[in-house]
Amino acid sequence: MVHHYHYVIVLLLLFFTSISSHQHHDHDHDPSIISTMEQFSGYSILEPTSFSSLSYDAQALQNQIDELSGFSDAPAPSVTRVLYTDKDVLARRYVKNLMGIAGLSVREDAVGNIFGRWDGSEPGLAAVATGSHIDAIPYSGKYDGVVGVLGAVEAISVLKRSGFKPKRSLEVILFTSEEPTRFGISCLGSRLLAGSENLANSLKTITDSQNVSFLDAARSAGYARDEDDLSSVFLKKGTYSAFIELHIEQGPILEDEGISIGIVTAIAAPASLRVEFEGNGGHAGAVLMPNRNDAGLAASELALAVEKHVLESGSVDTVGTVGILQLHPGAINSIPSKSHIEIDTRDIDEERRNQVIEKIHETAIRITKTRGVKLTEFHIINQDPPALSDEAVVNAMETATKELNLTSKLMISRAYHDSLFMARVSPMGMIFIPCYKGYSHKPEEFASIKDMSNGVKVLAFTLAKLSLQ
Ligand SMILES: [Zn+2]
């Protein structure tokens, strides 16, 4: 109870200091401050019943996460929740219901991005938004994305219970299909919100592996009713003054270093390449070495060149991976006549990453000459620009962690998130919380109640601050 009391005081103090010019912080028991806060909040601060109603309910969030994980096509503790399946629709209903209980007005767009809005005192101003995703790749865990959706609803509830009145409206967003599982497109909802004309066009014809079209799948889930044109989803410029996403780190740094909060300053973005070589096959014994045009060795040489070019960038933030390398015909006594490799390269610096791609391309062409093979494909599958967090949003998150006496660290998100795309249409920031051993995308994924509580509190503070700016 004492802990909650202090939290409420600090919370309200933050609102107070945001509107008055200067206050010092160490006066929890100063009666004049309490009466000023009472005036500001409209609550009786010392009345015990309002304490319990203002308190942050960490267990409730955990219960909601557990309940949501039940909407799954895999047995617990695994979670499988794929876009527009029955379980996805039920999970969406569950979240909309929670938004309703929190007093948010709920709206959905044509692809099922869900918005829960709390009107501020000046609803005409650009709103402050937060959110994440609830879809889960096959046999993954229950925290990825979910913490940033259910935690956001809880953060807003905390603010409501505290008597806080936002100036800018606050919105919780559930993004459709962050994971590429069904249609091969990651961050489908946020990409579309950010105004991707290419995506809006390709969604008219795209199908899943069962040959179900995107539009039919969306309709079966109650979306895209009478429209083939999905450009209605595009956000108008200036809809949001800030966007913040709360997410598990999906890496081991915060846990290793014993730090409560990661403040993300940049999100690395991947580029994916598909490369194919064609040479001459032949018998592994009969064809002598000088007479070979081995497509397998061409691919191997390119794979090693990927590593070399990435290391040449001189930055630890540049990474490259050859995750797929296939040889045809794939027999021990047959010289590979065809090879197929897929390359993922990422960086927080777009130009540097694109230079790596350029070098990989040059090397691929050189290999065709030295090995007498053909480069039958060099295709850039996608090449999304990285994003930097907004300085004002980072400042608000840093101030929040200080007010809450939490340890924090500035860091880079090496995985990408819906925030990468929201950054195209709004100032953006992300809050990371530790997760067990950095595990993610598997059933062992875990974040403690304490770490989630910290994340929700930092989010609530940050939203409150930004809503008054
Ligand atoms: Zn995620």
Image: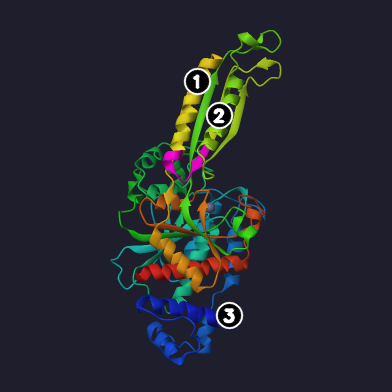
The tag on residue 284 is none
Residue occupied by mark 2: 305
The magenta-colored residue range is: 344-352
Residue 345 shown in magenta: yes
**Amino acid of disc 3:** His
At mark 3, the secondary structure is helix
Q: Which residue does the numbered mark 3 point to in the structure image?
A: 3
Drawn side of residue 41 relative to residue 143, left or right:
left
Residue 279, x across and y down, in percent: 56, 15
**Residue at the limit of the structure toward the left, as seen here:** 124
Which residue type does callout 1 highlight?
A: Arg
Question: What whole-number distance in Å separates the C-alpha atoms at marks 1 and 3?
Answer: 66 Å
The picture places residue 447, in percent across and down from the top left corner, at: 62, 61
Q: Nearer the viewer, mark 1 or mark 3?
A: 1
Marks counted in the figure total: 3
For marks 1 and 3 on the same chain, the one whose residue lies earlier in the sequence: 3
Q: Amino acid at mark 2?
A: Ala
**Could you tell me if the residues under marks 1 and 2 are in contact, i.e. CB atoms within 8 Å?**
no
Residue 262 spot, x, y in % from top left: 53, 60
Q: Are marks 3 and 2 in contact (CB under 8 Å)?
A: no
Would you identify the image quadrant in which residue 42 lies? bottom left
- Camera-nearest label, 3 or 2: 2
| Residue bearing the label numbered 1 | 366
Spatial CA distance of label 1 from label 2 is 11 Å
Q: Residue at x 53, y 81 (%)?
A: 6
